[in-house]
C-alpha cells in the first residue's frame, strides 16, 4: 500500500524527523489561504499529491505550457493559479503511463531553499536477509541515474531488525556523506526516524528523496515516500486509514474486496486461474503463442485454492469490465479447489453477466469429470464457452478466437 508524500512526512515527523511546515489543500482557495499562513514574506512550494515519483519532472497532460507537479510560487495569485491548473489536468510522470494521474490533493509547503540534496532510504536486501539503509551524497532527483551509472556512490548499511538502526551507524553514515558540525546530529535523527517507521509500521520501502541541507544550514526532509506491506495492515490500523483508493486501479480495489489477487495489464486476453504459480505460467503461455499476433494477457488473476462460486462470478465481472478484453482463458487445476465449483461458477457467470467474448476453459484435477459434464450441458445456452483438453491447446485456441 502506498501513501501520499504528506502522509509519509507526518509519520516521519511523529518519529522525530525535521519536516518543513505544510498545509494539505483540495481547492485553489485553500491554496491561497495556505500561502498567507506559510509564505513569511517569501514564496511557497505547491506540490501535487499522487502515488507516483518524478512529479517535479512530470508534465500536465493536455496543458500547453511545461508545468509539472511541483512549482515554486512567489505570490498568492500565482499559487492559486497554479493550483487551478494542477487540479484541472492529469499529471504524467515516468511512473504513471501516458494517460497521467488526476490530481485531487495538493500541499503548500514552506520553501526550504535547499543548497545540497541527498538520498536516503531503507529497503530489504533479500541477499543479506536484512534491512539496509542506503544513502548517497549524489542523490536527489537523479538517484536512478546515479544507481545505474555510478553505483559506487551509494553507501549501504545493513542493520538488525531486532535492534533497529543504531545511533552510531547513522552518525558514521552522516560523516561519510559529508555532513559536518551540528548537521551530523540532524541527519542522524532523520535516518533513525526513517528506520523506525520502516520497522514499526512494516514498510517495504521508506525513502527520503531529497534529504536537503538548506541555505541556512538546516537538514530537512523535502520529500518522502513509503510503501507498506498489505499483509501487515491488520496490525496497523493507523496506516490502513491512510489508504487513498482513488489513487488505485478501481478493478484492483474491487478485486481486493472480494479476496482476489488481481493485477490489471495491457493485453487483450483475460486470465482466471487458481494459484499464483499457475497464473504466471498461464500468462507466459499466452505470451508465447500470442506474440506473433500481438496478443498478450490482460491481467494476473489468482482466485485462490478455496474459491467460491460467488468469488468466481465476481472475478468474471471484473475481467469483463475491461473493454480491451477480447477473450478469456480459464485455467484451473483442482487440488484444493473443485473443478465442479469453477464450472458451476462459469455457467452462473455466463447467464448472469453474459460472455460477450470467447471463454476457453481448461480444467484438470479434483471433480474434473463432473465439471466437464456441467459445461457440456450448458453448451447450448453459452455458445461462446469453449473447452480444451490441455493448456497448450487452450492457449492456442483463445489466441485464435480473440484475434
Image: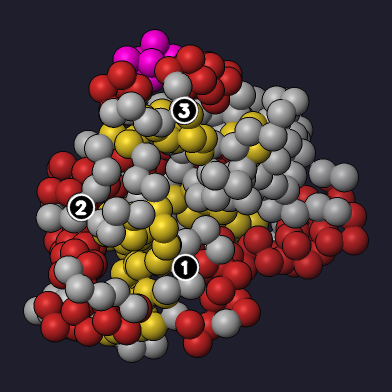
Instruction: Compare residues 257 and 68 and report the one nearer the observer.
Output: 68
User: In the displayed structure, does residue 170 sit left or right of residue 392?
Assistant: left
Type of secondary structure dominating the magenta stretch:
helix
Image quadrant in which you'd find residue 104: top left
Q: Residue 131: image x %, image y %? A: 28, 77
Instruction: Tell me the number on the disc at residue 139.
Output: 1
In the image, the segment drawn in magenta is 26-33
Q: In the rendering, at what x and y percent does residue 277 appear?
A: 51, 68
Q: Is residue 78 above or below residue 265?
A: above
In the image, residue 372 lies in the stretch drawn in magenta: no
Q: In the rendered view, tell whether residue 229 sits above or below residue 342.
A: below
| Residue furthest to the right | 292
| Label 2 neighbour load within 10 Å: few <14, some 14-19, many 20+ | many
Left of 296 or right of it: where is 132?
A: left
**Mark closer to the chain start, 1 or 2:** 2
Q: Which of the 4 image quarters holds residue 285?
A: bottom right
Which residue is painted at 82% across and 59% down in the image?
Answer: 290
Q: Which residue is mark 3?
A: 74
Q: Nearer the viewer, residue 250 or 376?
A: 250
Q: Nearest to the eye among marks 2 and 3: give it.
A: 3
Q: Which element type, helix, strand or loop, lies under badge 1?
A: loop
Q: The residue tagged with tag 3: helix, strand or loop?
A: loop
Compared to residue 347, the image places residue 18 above or below, namely below
Q: Nearer the viewer, residue 251 or 373?
A: 251
**Residue 317 visible in this rendered orientation of the protein:** no
Q: Residue at x 61, y 24 (%)?
A: 89
The residue indicated by pointer 2 is: 18
Of marks 3 and 1, which one's residue comes earlier in the chain?
3
Let me know if residue 29 is in the magenta part. yes
Amino acid at each position: 500500500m502506498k501513501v501520499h508524500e504528506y502522509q509519509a512526512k507526518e509519520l516521519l515527523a511523529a518519529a522525530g524527523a525535521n519536516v518543513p511546515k505544510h498545509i494539505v489543500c483540495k481547492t485553489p482557495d485553500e491554496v491561497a489561504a495556505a500561502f498567507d499562513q506559510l509564505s513569511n514574506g517569501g514564496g511557497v512550494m505547491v506540490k501535487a499529491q499522487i502515488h507516483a515519483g518524478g512529479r517535479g519532472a512530470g508534465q500536465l497532460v493536455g496543458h500547453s505550457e511545461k508545468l509539472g507537479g511541483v512549482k515554486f510560487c512567489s505570490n498568492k495569485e500565482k499559487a492559486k493559479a497554479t493550483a487551478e491548473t494542477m487540479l484541472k489536468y492529469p499529471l504524467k510522470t515516468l511512473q504513471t503511463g501516458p494517460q497521467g494521474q488526476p490530481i485531487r490533493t495538493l500541499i503548500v509547503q514552506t520553501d526550504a531553499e535547499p543548497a545540497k540534496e541527498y538520498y536516503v532510504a531503507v529497503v530489504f536486501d533479500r541477499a543479506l536477509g536484512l534491512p539496509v539503509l542506503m544513502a548517497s551524497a549524489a542523490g536527489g532527483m537523479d538517484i536512478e541515474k546515479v544507481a545505474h551509472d555510478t553505483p559506487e556512490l551509494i553507501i549501504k548499511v545493513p542493520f538488525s531488525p531486532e535492534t533497529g538502526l543504531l545511533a552510531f551507524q547513522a552518525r558514521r553514515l552522516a560523516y561519510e556523506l559529508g555532513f559536518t558540525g551540528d548537521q551530523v546530529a540532524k541527519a542522524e535523527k532523520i535516518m533513525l526516524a526513517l528506520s523506525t517507521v520502516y520497522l514499526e509500521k512494516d514498510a517495504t520501502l521508506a525513502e527520503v528523496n531529497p534529504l536537503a541541507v538548506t541555505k541556512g544550514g538546516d537538514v530537512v526532509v523535502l520529500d518522502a515516500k513509503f510503501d507498506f506491506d498489505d499483509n501487515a495492515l491488520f496490525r496497523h490500523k493507523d496506516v490502513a486509514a491512510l489508504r487513498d483508493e482513488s489513487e488505485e486501479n478501481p478493478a484492483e480495489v474491487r478485486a481486493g474486496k472480494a479476496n482476489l489477487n488481481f493485477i490489471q495489464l495491457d493485453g487483450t486476453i483475460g486470465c482466471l486461474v487458481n494459484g499464483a504459480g499457475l497464473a504466471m505460467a498461464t500468462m507466459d503461455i499466452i505470451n508465447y503463442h500470442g506474440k506473433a499476433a500481438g496478443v498478450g494477457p490482460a491481467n494476473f488473476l489468482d482466485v485462490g485454492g478455496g474459491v467460491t462460486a460467488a468469488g468466481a462470478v465476481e472475478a468474471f465481472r471484473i475481467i469483463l469490465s475491461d473493454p480491451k478484453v477480447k477473450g478469456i482463458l480459464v485455467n484451473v487445476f483442482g487440488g484444493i479447489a473443485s473443478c465442479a465449483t469453477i464450472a458451476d461458477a462459469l455457467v452462473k457467470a455466463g447467464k448472469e453477466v453474459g460472455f460477450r467474448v470467447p471463454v476457453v476453459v481448461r480444467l484438470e484435477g479434483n471433480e474434473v469429470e463432473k465439471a466437464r459434464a456441467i459445461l457440456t450441458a450448458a453448451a447450448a445456452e453459452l455458445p461462446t464457452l469453449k473447452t480444451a483438453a490441455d493448456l497448450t491447446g487452450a492457449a492456442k485456441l483463445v489466441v485464435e478466437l480473440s484475434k
